[in-house]
Amino acid sequence: MFESLLPKNFVEEFSAELEKGGISGLQAYSKGTTSLVFTGNLGEKKVIVKLQRPDSPRNNFEREAKLIQVVSRFGITPPLLSTGVFKGLNYMVREFASGEPILYADLEKSHIIEIALKAALLDRLGLDHGQIQGGKHIIIGEPVYFIDFEKANWRRPRNLTSAMAMMFLGDNSIAKRIREKFSLGRDFLDELRNELVEYKKTAKLSGILGLLSRL
């Protein structure tokens, strides 16, 4: 998967370096615009190893690692286990988020409420994730996790409004699937819009949670 970006001997040497820290079974998993992602095992734990792409013009690993350390304390994202540099490329290791991306998952009411609570908590922390509406950065499992904070920043947060738009109000496969599953009509959607307006004004979450509890 990464042959065009990383020579085979580099991956072998990187794997050997990680094994010194107890991480074994390194396997290519996915690639993004700024990183290459592997899975591995640390004892009985499955882990994610995120390595800076050698052709990436942007190196924000240190900033992302600090953000993960902050939000993982609140159970929003899996814990960061370690960071390092290998042959000039930054990497980080975190626990694996088990589950399915929201884009493909069959959501229950409990998942939706947990997403709302964690998105609102990010809002209260003042951290905007920045990529919620893509559908790939919320993992539906036990627990629900938000992942990939490389574009997150301390700016005016829109996490809850973005999550609610993605799950209910948007013209996308996630919202269509949820509206069909819970038989949601215009009245519910209008009420949700009104509660989101109130949330933007007051930051009160009770109205939205009350509405979601009726699903």
Image: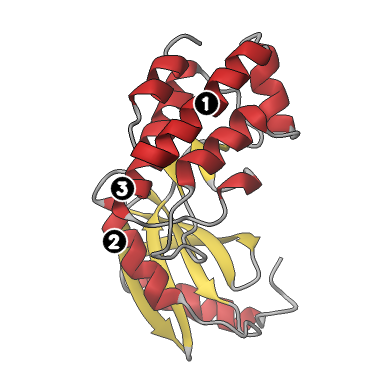
Dot 2: element: helix
- Identified by mark 3, the residue type is Arg
Q: Is residue 61 left or right of residue 180?
A: left
Q: Is residue 72 left or right of residue 52?
A: left
Q: Residue furthest bottom?
A: 88
- Identified by mark 2, the residue type is Gln
Colour pattern of the rendering: secondary structure
Query: Measured along the vertical axis of the image, is residue 190 above or below residue 187?
Result: below
Q: Is residue 28 left or right of residue 89?
A: right
Residue for badge 2: 69
Cα gap from disc 1 to disc 2, whole angstroms: 34 Å
Query: Residue drawn at (33%, 32%), measured in percent from left and top?
Result: 204
Dot 1: element: helix
Residue 51 at x, y percent in the picture:
51, 73
Q: Nearer the viewer, mark 1 or mark 2?
A: 1
Query: Residue drawn at (43%, 24%), measured in percent from left and top?
Result: 208
- Identified by mark 1, the residue type is Asn
Category of crowding for the residue at label 1, using alpha-carbon neighbours closer than 10 angstroms: few (below 14), some (14–19), many (at least 20) = few
Query: Residue drawn at (43%, 32%), measured in percent from left and top?
Result: 198
Residue for badge 1: 194
Residue 106 at x, y percent in the picture:
60, 23
Residue 165 position by quadrant: top right
Query: Measured along the vertical axis of the image, is residue 90 above or below residue 182?
Result: below
Residue 63 at x, y percent in the picture:
39, 74
Q: Earlier in the sequence, mark 3 or mark 1?
A: 3
Residue for badge 3: 124
Cα gap from disc 3 to disc 1, whole angstroms: 20 Å
Viewer-nearest residue: 149 or 91: 149
Q: What is the quadrant of the N terminus in the image?
A: bottom right
Q: Earlier in the sequence, mark 1 or mark 2?
A: 2
